[in-house]
Image (spheres, helix red, strand yellow):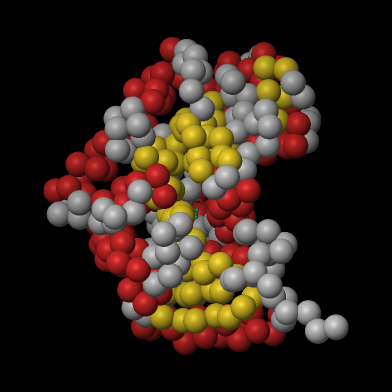
Amino acid sequence: MIQTMTRTPVNVTVTGAAGQIGYALLFRIASGQLLGADVPVRLRLLEIPQAVKAAEGTAMELDDCAFPLLAGVDIFDDATKAFDGANVALLVGARPRTKGMERGDLLEANGGIFKPQGEAINAGAADDIKVLVVGNPANTNSLIAQQHAPDVPAERFTAMTRLDHNRALAQLAKKTGVSVADIKKLTIWGNHSATQYPDIFHAEIAGKNAAEVVNDQQWLADDFIPTVAKRGAAIIEARGASSAASAASAAIDHVHTWVNGTAEGDWTSMAVVSDGSYGVPEGLISSFPVTTKDGKWEIVQGLEVNEFSRTRIDASVAELSEERDAVRKLGLI
Ligand code: NAD
Ligand code: LMR
């Protein structure tokens, strides 16, 4: 019997497809790891004209993998065309920072990319569009795109802090000698930047409170938090280039969890539009503890925030407010 695809392919638009994250991401999407092992996908790749040829090379390699779930690859240098009919959009294309740069330095350089992309999503994306912004400064770029897509529900625009979440899981697992799978309810709050706050006060390790298991406030303040928050810079220092495979892996995790749901008794970290929860000003795209179900996310409510956490959440959120002011001044929102 000849087997054919019975489900309509999901259109996944990826920007910056010829970049280093793109190269680590596309093959995993095409193999079914983004949406599920039974979900066919059609890739729509967006690049700047100078990088289209390199994207074509990647498309040739995608062909050569003969992925059964890959229904096709189209390459564009025009955002309106690339986002037409998109069900999932991964906005990766942006300049990465290099040694010595802070993410804030990228605001102007990269912010300009996200206004036309938001407009293009507004113009032609599918009704169920879900957007993940990876390109830095991710939270504020997501805000820019969202502000230029008034017809798309704001909650469909998210930014990636899953890499920070995964980094925190790995550090905590190492410290306590457990498997990452034993850790639940960890949270990244705020901005995907050095001000982010990885919070273990509500986390559980094999059912026990993580902060109590660790019982080492100095490690928490002087080791764990800065190691997680500055990991991006440490990778740049070590590799001479910003994280790529781990960023691609986190993007896969983010969308997979959004579409397929969080496990019972656990949550994840996603930067989503604030409804004012936990004192985060409404409208900012800030990282929260989030559960997902049926393709929708919800901010976990009712967590007690201690003094230690409050100061750190407030500092990161203040930075997000400053970034919003800065892009306002630049006329990007
Ligand atoms: P890269 O330079 O290797 O690739 C970027 C690609 O984007 C290039 O191919 C470039 O041609 C393309 N591009 C530039 N402008 C574009 C536009 N307007 N439309 C479409 N494509 C465009 O960079 P990379 O290492 O893949 O990183 C991409 C971005 O992701 C950077 O901003 C980086 O800082 C960010 N990043 C975010 C996280 C996170 O956790 N949120 C983690 C790692 C990297
Ligand atoms: C990361 O966290 O690895 C990326 O956002 C790259 C960077 O600039 O830190």
Q: Please say whether residue 54 is visible from this viewpoint.
A: no
Q: Residue at x 62, y 78 (%)?
A: 71
Q: Is residue 318 left or right of residue 64?
A: left
Q: Position of residue 175 (x, y in %)?
A: 71, 29
In the rendered image, the vertical position of residue 58 relative to residue 95, given as above or below: below
Q: Residue at x 56, y 35 (%)?
A: 291
Question: In the depicted view, which residue is nearer to us: 237 or 275?
Answer: 275
Question: In the depicted view, which residue is nearer to us: 28 or 323?
Answer: 28
**Quadrant for the N terminus in the image:** bottom right
Question: In the depicted view, which residue is nearer to us: 97 or 35?
Answer: 35
Q: Position of residue 133 (x, y in %)?
A: 43, 54
Q: Residue at x 65, y 31 (%)?
A: 266
Q: Is residue 45 left or right of residue 125?
A: right
Q: Position of residue 12 (x, y in %)?
A: 52, 67
Q: Residue at x 48, y 31 (%)?
A: 299
Q: Please say whether residue 11 is visible from this viewpoint.
A: yes
In the rendered image, the vertical position of residue 331 relative to residue 208, given as above or below: below
